[in-house]
Amino acid sequence: MTIILLLVFFTMLIFGLPLFASMLVTSISGFLYIGDFSLLRIMVQQFYGGMEPFSLLAIPYFILVGELMGSAGLTERLLRFAEALVGHLKGGLGYVTVVASIIFAGVNGSAAADASAVGSIMIPAMKKGGYPASYAAGLTAGSSLIGPIIPPSIFMILFGAMTKTNVGALFIAGVMPGLLLGIAFMLMHRVSAARLDLPIVNSEFSFSKLLSATGGAITSLVAPGIIIGGILFGFMTPTESGAVASLYVLVVGFVWTRQLSWKAVCKALGNTVRLTSVIFVVIGAATIVGWILSSEQVPQKLAPIVLEYAKTPSMVLLFMSLIIFVVGMFMEEIAALVLLTPVFAPLAVAAGIDPLHFGIVMTLNITIALITPPMGACVYIVSSIGSVPLEKMFKHIWPFVLVAIVCQLMLIFFPAISTWLPKMLGY
């Protein structure tokens, strides 16, 4: 049955149907295969039920925070802070890009938003500074993968809602893996900076300049501080932290920076509604397919087969990661997450894998697909921003994919990277 559903799904995509419509047709095919037409009424229940979990309300808030920060001029302040911090190093603009992605990751939880916000400023700056256009775009796309790993994370919210895993615990579990990914990209850039003989932005480190940039960036750094700190210390739920951060950026944009206008707010709200609607419709449609797979006990039938060959939790994760990686290359990431989680989560439980560990591995795996051909949403974004042909982008993106895969393998074989901090905090 699973093979039939996949064939129907990809056939619909080939014929150009929108993603959610392809899933709806796939679910109808599933009900027809089962032969019980009375089950069709479940489609509506599952479609709306998939959008009901309270934790999903955090998604529009995190999107809104990112939209408002750009309009309020806070994103530029973060970039100036990052430049003052690491701009004196050889290839400094590349380090600025990675550091900015780490900071911005603590705001909106989206790789696409990270790539767009950071890339629109850093790619032109790197090109002007003598960086090869394809490398500048590749580094930006690669660094954007940090966005969904460091909290907040839209992918983690979806995973938590589907598996009943504590979203706050997932967020905390993503801190160390996100920093690991950032450090890995910096090390890779260090090698590339020497090989390409990339220029230095600032002649030497200036403490006074860093102090000045920090003062200017404090208002920007408070936003991720509200989100991460509120969740980390248990003051707020992810949804509440997103709402408070949105209100904070709104006030700062009008009162402090005075760069925010009602027109910009309306535009930000419009973009938030549009992006949220796209995500929620896909979630609803994918939930129906997930229900069909669960009702037919696909996870239960798959578990004995996998566990027969994969004897350890690490081997099970490797097996699942390979499938997720291949599926993610050809399917939209949120759809892949919503479809595969109901299948693999019970398998992970059967193999004795910590839900937090599995959630982070799943999230990073889905995230890597954002820069792999032929889908690679972040590749398309930075290609457009940097005016780099797609064929050049995909040609130069593989080193960044390999670095991310190495980090993924470290997460798989060293679970403490993701589970130590939540356990220390009592989760």
Image: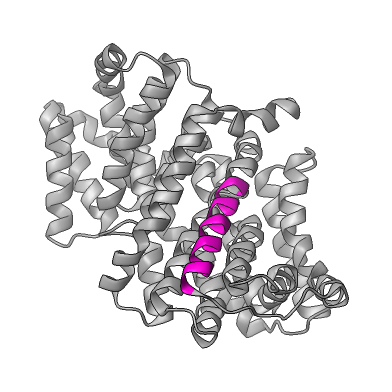
Number of residue marks: 0
- Residue 47: x and y in percent read 36, 43
| Depicted 388 relative to depicted 64: above or below | below
- Kindly tell me whether residue 150 is visible in this rendering: no
- Residue at 68 percent of width and 84 percent of height: 261
Residue nearer the viewer, 88 or 10: 88
Residue 185 visible somewhere in the drawing:
yes
* Residue 162, placed above or below residue 384: above
Q: Which residue is drawn at the image coordinates 12% and 36% (left, top)? A: 4
322 to 136, vertically: above or below: above
Specify whether residue 193 is painted magenta.
yes
The spot of residue 409 in percent (x, y) is 44, 36
Q: Position of residue 138 (x, y in %)?
A: 42, 67
Judge from the rendering whether residue 399 lies leftward or rightward of residue 219; answer left or right.
Answer: left
Residue at horizontal 28 percent and vertical 58 percent from the top: 373
Q: Is residue 67 left or right of residue 248?
A: left
179, 37: nearer the viewer:
179
Quick one: 234 or 313, which is closer to the camera? 313
- Quadrant of the rendering where the C terminus is positioned: top right
User: Relative to 319, is 102 on the left or the right?
Assistant: right
Q: Main secondary structure of the magenta part?
A: helix
Q: Position of residue 249 (x, y in %)?
A: 73, 68
Q: Residue furthest bottom?
A: 128
Q: Which residues are magenta?
A: 179-196
| Image quadrant assignment for residue 133 | bottom left
Question: Which quadrant of the rendered structure holds the N terminus?
Answer: top left
Query: Which of these two is toward me, 284 or 123?
Result: 123
202 drawn magenta: no
Say left or right for 418 vs 320.
Answer: right
Res 394 quadrant in image: bottom left
